[in-house]
Amino acid sequence: MADVVEEKLRTYFRDKGFSPGDALPKEVELAEALQVSRNVVREALSRLRMLGMIETRKRRGMILAEPDVLSGLERLLDPQLLGKDVMKQLFELRLVLEIGMGDLLFMRRKETDLQILQQIVEDELKATSHVERVECDIRFHGTLYRMTGNETLGRFQKLLVPMFQYIIENEAGPDGQTAVGAVSHAGLLAILRHGDPTSFREAMKKHLDPHFLFL
């Protein structure tokens, strides 16, 4: 019953035109409007509160809040809790995102960001171990996510870092090394400086090809 009422509350708030920050009716009023018991309404409201959709404030009572869409994922995306199929699907999502972020990167690129990427490329060339190269890879791609200017993308990338580690470990050959794409990080940086979104998408696909072959 609480599941049903939770969905009814969502519909009720939407149909009544409530927006984030608006004060909500009291429990007894909601129970009457939905024609259910107050106890069930309280449980359904508690679930919405846990999701960040409802807050309680002094002198205002319950208000409709704007939920943090990634807060739940931050608690759930633990490699120890996820099966191999889910890990693989999340990694595939990462590949799709990175191939498609070219337009945002060219809209919002800054010279300071390009200089950071240049330093990562130089650090990668100096790397003497597989671990150091993996760290450079994560730094390079993490910087690309940040450069998009999309906070949700940036946070999502940080959530997926453990998935990157998992796939990279599984892709490694007997010598502990992983295959390298036809386009390097240095090549991607050159296109960011002098190319366009279309050429970046094509280059990123070539850069990520070893991952697609593994999958």
Image: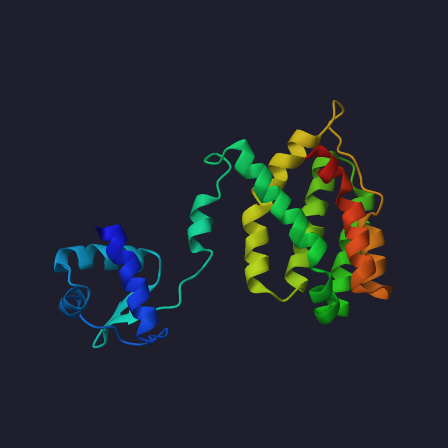
Residue depicted at x 80% and y 58%: 200
Give the quadrant of residue 27: bottom left
Colour mode of the rendering = rainbow
In the image, is residue 116 above or below residue 162?
A: below
The x and y percentages for residue 13 are 31, 69
Q: Which quadrant holds the C terminus?
A: top right
Give the quadrant of residue 112: bottom right
Give the quadrant of residue 88: top right
Position of 140 compared to 57: left or right? right
Residue depicted at x 39% and y 68%: 66
Position of 43 compared to 210: left or right? left
Residue depicted at x 19% and y 59%: 41
The answer to whether residue 64 shows anywhere in this view is no
Residue depicted at x 66% and y 64%: 148
The x and y percentages for residue 91 are 61, 42
In the image, is residue 161 above or below residue 107?
A: above
In the image, is residue 4 above or below residue 88?
A: below
Position of 69 compared to 178: left or right? left
Q: Nearer the viewer, residue 1 or 54?
A: 1
In this view, which residue lies farthest toward the top?
A: 174
The x and y percentages for residue 151 are 56, 63
- Tally of numbered discs: 0
The x and y percentages for residue 22 are 31, 76
Position of 172 compared to 23: left or right? right
The answer to whether residue 9 shows anywhere in this view is yes
